Image: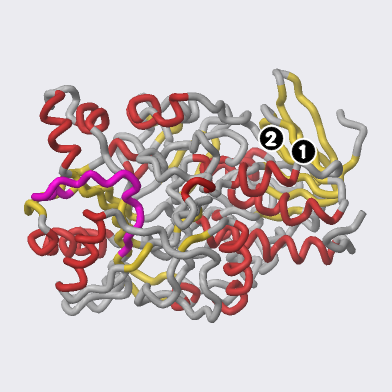
Amino acid sequence: MSTERYDVIIVGTGAGGGTLAHHLAPTGKRILLLERGDYLPRERDNWDSKAVMVDGKYKADETWFDKDGRPFHPGIHYCVGGNTKFYGAVLLRLRERDFGTLHHRGGVSPPWPISYADLAPYYLRAERLYSVHGQRGSDPTEPPCADPYPYPPVSHEPRIQELSDDLTRAGHRPFPLPVGIRLDEAQPHRSACVRCPTCDGFPCLVQAKADAHVTCVAPAVEHPNVTLLTGAYAERLETGPSGRAVTGVVVRRNGVEETYRGDLVVVSCGAINSAALLLRSASDQHPGGLANGSGVVGRHYMCHLNSALVAVSRRPNPTRFQKTLGINDFYFGADDWDYPLGHIQMLGKTDAAMFAAESGGLLPGFAADTLATRALDFWLTSEDLPDPDNRVEVGRDGRITLRYTPNNVEAHERLVAKLKGLLGRIGCERTLIPREVYFGKRIAIAGTGHQNGTIRFGHDPKSSALDVNCKAHEVDNLYVVDASVFPSSAAVNPTLTILANALRVGDHLIERLGATVGAA
């Protein structure tokens, strides 16, 4: 057992935990960061599509099970910075209407206990912290903000500019995606980012992507009051006799069980593993899992309805950095559909190795190469709705079962149909090819990049596990700052909302600790 006591223990160094650590580090309070993985190695394979996308070299060597007991390997990464090391760095705000009740054909998306106005100043801070490039006013559904993005939008390469022009002529309003990268197009000789073709889904070898490790954890650990332990798997959280406070974080490190103690404990392991940690922490005082008197911990799992689809361009597409364009014209509906459909954005470019692997070796090398030179890659996202039966379960042997049945499927099918209907107008063949290698063989279950919703926050302890400050209703010193707090999933990438909420909760914790930023 460690004899040192910390002011704050943060479990997880991804979008939520890493950002919170960065925010708290200047207070001088003693902070312990626990990361189950290690630093991701910087090596040539970081940029090798076969190693990353096909072989899954950096994915966790872990087996989970679906609702039918079938094993699968989740698209998840355990390392300093978490899944942000591999994200596409698209940092979109939830729409203002996403914070309220939103009616879908498949059901109701519930309101959040905070409004867009509550989170808006933290969105702006997160955009500045994560070097977001974008163009305010270009997205037809974007929420209000008077301040420009910190950096100008990432420019389209010629084929993507043609795509944007074609969409505009067809009556749509494409917009530059807000992207978090350390790019200086005006002075490329000074730019950390080199606009390589291996950004989306890959770790950045030159550390130019604004991930949680580079942006937040690395600067945080420069502070003498911040300690990072890698290879530290949090097995459970212990509470005292009353059950009202976490008294110890039990960690397995180098095969040895260790216990760490802190005044405040913040869980940020991702929606699935955060729920699993609380469920593993069941005790006499919390028989259904820690902070789970409401019974919602592990329930309402959401991951979006996602499709990675490739259109075959009639014109060559030599684009390297492709993820620069988005379409939100169908976000809240269409002329022939009164309900939300979702969001479309570009994906990183598919290369020949990915096509060859996806065909199971049936596509000859020259054919894969030809297809890759004409591929336009799209990522489509629709909102899935919180269903209590979609849930994370932990067996007595510790194995994780992810029970998930997609819902609101018709909206996503209609969104795919909208993209298909545009193919002729954007210079493409009238066929879309699934690109399932992006997140594994089945995006719906193995694709955990957009996981959220398993430890929802709210006003009512009967229907939520956390209060509006993301503190457990039943445990006075336990907080959660990842996407598990989301009551609904909306239909845009969740990362910026995780970052903004971590900063919001960070302000609350600074006040609770009686600290000031910049304290000695």
Please say if 409 is above or below 35: below
- For the stretch drawn in magenta, the main secondary structure is loop
317 or 345, which lies in front?
317
**Residue 300 visible in the current orientation:** no
The alpha-carbon separation of the residues under discs 2 and 1 comes to 7 Å
Please say if 367 is above or below 489: above
Q: Crowdedness of circle 2 by 10 Å Cα count: few (<14), some, many (20+)?
A: many
Q: Quadrant of residue 122?
A: bottom right
Asked if the residues shown at circle 2 and circle 1 are in contact, with their CB atoms under 8 angstroms apart, the answer is: yes
Q: Position of residue 270 (x, y in %)?
A: 56, 46
Q: Which residues are magenta?
A: 311-326
Q: Residue at x 50, y 24 (%)?
A: 43
**Label 1 residue SS:** strand
- Residue type at mark 2: give it: Ala
Label for residue 249? Answer: 1
Q: Crowdedness of circle 1 by 10 Å Cα count: few (<14), some, many (20+)?
A: many
**Residue 130 visible in the current orientation:** yes
115 or 128, which lies in front?
128
With 29 as the anchor, is 283 left or right in this view?
A: left
33 or 49, which lies in front?
49
Q: Position of residue 381 (x, y in %)?
A: 33, 58
Q: Quadrant of the N terminus?
A: top right
With 454 as the anchor, is 18 left or right in this view?
A: right
Q: Residue at x 85, y 41 (%)?
A: 224
Label for residue 26? Answer: none
Q: Which residue is mark 2?
A: 234
**Label 2 residue SS:** strand
- Residue type at mark 1: give it: Val
